[in-house]
């Protein structure tokens, strides 16, 4: 199962030419991750912070395939690709008008606010595992 979210390209996302400035894509990526945890994991960032934990990004790889412009609506998809004891690698894509705009991978680590990695809480790990997309040659 994938998580999907639509994000319209707004004026604040764009450079003077009206094209999304690439760091804004990364802000949108973070918004997709944050809303994924709130909507799919029932574990909003506010709750994590109150519990003294978080999911910092430790690795980010992004390929920008085509520009997006003011007024475009981007359809974002998050797929859980790998799941470890305290980490998760997710694939992120954004499409607009049927055209791939960006794709990449984000590695998240469940950690204390001091930065020490911790095992995922059992309910969260179970939900992530349920959503994980296996590679075609990967054993179940």
Image (spheres, helix red, strand yellow):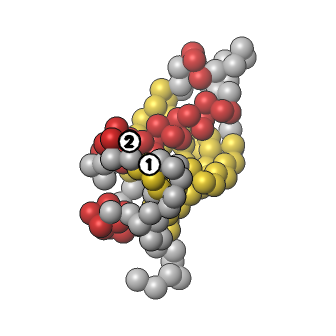
Query: Which residue is denoted by mark 1 in the rendering?
Result: 54
Q: What residue do we see at 68% from left, 27% from top?
A: 21
Is the C terminus in the top left, top right, bottom left or bottom right quadrant? Answer: bottom left
- Is the C-beta separation of discs 1 and 2 under 8 Å? yes
N-term mark: 1 or 2: 2
- The image shows residue 137, relative to residue 15, as above or below, that is below
Residue ranking furthest to the bottom:
139
Label 1 SS: strand
- The image shows residue 29, relative to residue 86, as above or below, that is above
The residue closer to the viewer here, 117 or 8, is 117
Q: What residue do we see at 64% from left, 51% from top?
A: 60
Residue 56, position in %: x, y? Answer: 52, 49
Label 2 SS: helix
Is the N terminus in the top left, top right, bottom left or bottom right quadrant? Answer: bottom left
Q: Is residue 106 visible?
A: no
Residue 4, position in %: x, y? Answer: 40, 46
Dot 1 surroundings within 10 Å: few (below 14), some, or many (20 or more)? many
Residue ranking furthest to the right:
17
Query: Which residue is denoted by mark 2 in the rendering?
Result: 49
- Disc marking residue 93: none
Q: Is residue 11 left or right of residue 55?
A: right
The residue closer to the viewer here, 69 or 32, is 32
Q: Is residue 137 left or right of residue 5?
A: right
Q: What residue do we see at 60% from left, 38% from top?
A: 26
């Amino acid at each position: 199962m994938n998580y999907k979210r639509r994000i319209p390209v707004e004026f604040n996302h764009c450079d003077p030419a009206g094209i999304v400035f690439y760091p804004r894509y990364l802000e949108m990526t973070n918004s997709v991750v944050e809303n994924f945890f709130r909507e799919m994991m029932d574990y909003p960032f506010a709750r994590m912070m109150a519990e003294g934990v978080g999911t910092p990004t430790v690795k980010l790889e992004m390929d920008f395939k085509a520009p997006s412009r003011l007024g475009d609506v981007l359809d974002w998809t998050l797929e859980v690709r790998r799941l470890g004891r305290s980490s998760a690698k997710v694939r992120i894509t954004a499409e607009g008008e049927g055209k791939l705009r960006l794709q990449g991978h984000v590695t998240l680590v469940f950690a204390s606010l001091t930065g020490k990695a911790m095992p995922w809480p059992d309910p969260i790990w179970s939900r992530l595992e349920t959503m994980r997309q296996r590679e075609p040659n990967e054993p179940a």
